[in-house]
Image: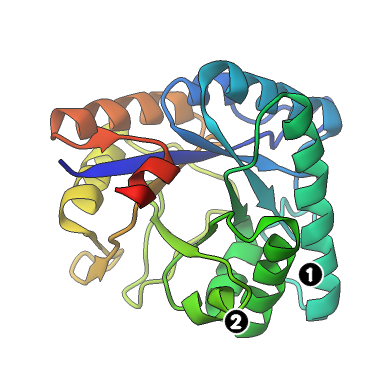
Amino acid sequence: MTAVDINCDCSESYGRWILGDDLGMMDHVTSINVATGYHGGDPSTIRRAVNGAVERGVNIGAHIAFPDLMGFGRRKMWIDPADLQDMCLYQIGALQVFVTAAGARLTHVKPHGSLYVMASDMPEYADAVAAAVAEVDATLPLLLLTTAMTEHAAKHGVTLVPESFPDLHYTPDGHLIIERIKKAWDPELVASRAVRMATEGSVVANDGETVIPTAAPTLCLHGDAPNGVEIARTTRRRLEEAGVAIRPLPEVLAA
């Protein structure tokens, strides 16, 4: 049986500004990526997300980002790799304390927004992020778009894990089209794309013709979409109806 993890980004609210339904998303996914304060996620929001995940048996990863609250981490930044490593270490460490206090452990690290895109393409950024992960725990998988930066993660003893995005468009050359503000998608469309990604390892690019390889052990859904919970519920149901088992990432990787 084919098995995949479903992950989503959580804890991206900040103070009185609320974004997404974190707890609602957690009822339909197996892993969450918790924002660590640089693009969203104040301390109380982080604690609520961590506690909610622990109560539901959902895996917890650090969703590290550029220091860009105003731009929600979706603006490109050019930062000295040594400084970037320290920024990533700082964020992972902050979340790790909350996770430890809740009696759980981190299971992965995933960059957010523009840091994700740039670390997936730029060796110096991939090195910086992987080095920070290794300083905390080299057994934590690092999630990026493809396996292109595998050797840069591996030299720090870190395993790179690719993921696929049913609710984002891909360009014909395989890059993601990041939505500045996440739009509502048709849940059935997202679900059908997820089923194809899980069973065939591919998706059609935004030109309507080019087939992009997307084989990955985890699928990402965005909780900041206006109908994120409906998308997550429909996607999980359709995957299970297609015979795809939904499992936590460590189980999928170990299979």
Is residue 44 something one can see in this rendering? yes
Spatial CA span between label 2 and label 1: 14 Å
Q: Which mark is residue 85?
A: 1
| Three-letter code for the amino acid on which mark 1 is drawn | Gln
Hey, which quadrant is residue 246 in on the image?
Answer: top left
- Rendered position, 28 above or below 244: above
Q: How many marks?
A: 2
Question: In the image, is residue 140 above or below residue 98?
Answer: below
Q: State whether residue 23 is above or below residue 87.
A: above
Q: Residue at x 86, y 73 (%)?
A: 83
Q: Quadrant of the N terminus?
A: top left
Residue plotted at (34% across, 52% down): 217
| Nearest-to-viewer mark from 2 and 1 | 1
Q: Nearer the viewer, residue 24 or 132?
A: 132
x then y, percent, for residue 255? 29, 48
Q: Quadrant of residue 85?
A: bottom right
Q: Is residue 21 visible?
A: no
Dot 2 or dot 1, earlier in sequence: 1
| Residue type for callout 2 | Met
Q: Residue at x 28, y 60 (%)?
A: 215
Left or right: 15 in relation to 133: right
